[in-house]
Amino acid sequence: MLDTAGGCRNRHLSFSFKRDGTLIGPPRPTAIKVEGDAKAKKLFVDAATTALQNCLPLTFSAKLAQGIAGNVFTLQFASPK
């Protein structure tokens, strides 16, 4: 479990979907703001990535799958102070 006493933490992940609802490659961190040492940063980054992976694969309708595949999405993961 992460200790949030050190302040607010957030990370932005960028990712793209295939038509089948899985990711095209691993999520890419685009911004990371985590107070603490390298271990704290790695723990938060790993937790955000795992949270995203646990939601996959998504189920898209055929029409949505055609339009969504390959587009880049960015999602912010944050924990309060």
Image: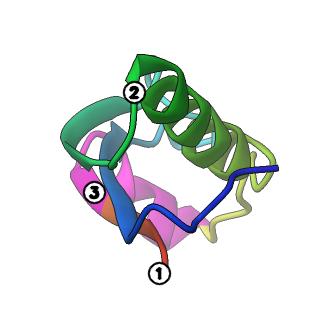
Q: CA distance from mark 2 to mark 3?
A: 28 Å
At mark 3, the secondary structure is strand
Picture mark count = 3
Is residue 73 located in the magenta-colored stretch of the structure?
yes
At mark 2, the secondary structure is loop
Q: Amino acid at mark 2?
A: Asp
Q: Which residues are magenta?
A: 62-74
Disc on res. 81: 1
Q: Where in the figure is residue 2, as x and y percent of width and height? A: 70, 51
Closer to the N terminus: mark 3 or mark 1? 3
**Which residue reaches farthest bottom?**
80
Q: Which residue has dot 3 on it?
A: 73
Q: CA distance from mark 3 to mark 1?
A: 26 Å
Q: Which of labels 2 and 3 is toward the front?
A: 2
Residue at the location (43% across, 32% down)? 41
Residue at the location (35% across, 40% down)? 15
Q: Which residue has dot 2 on it?
A: 37
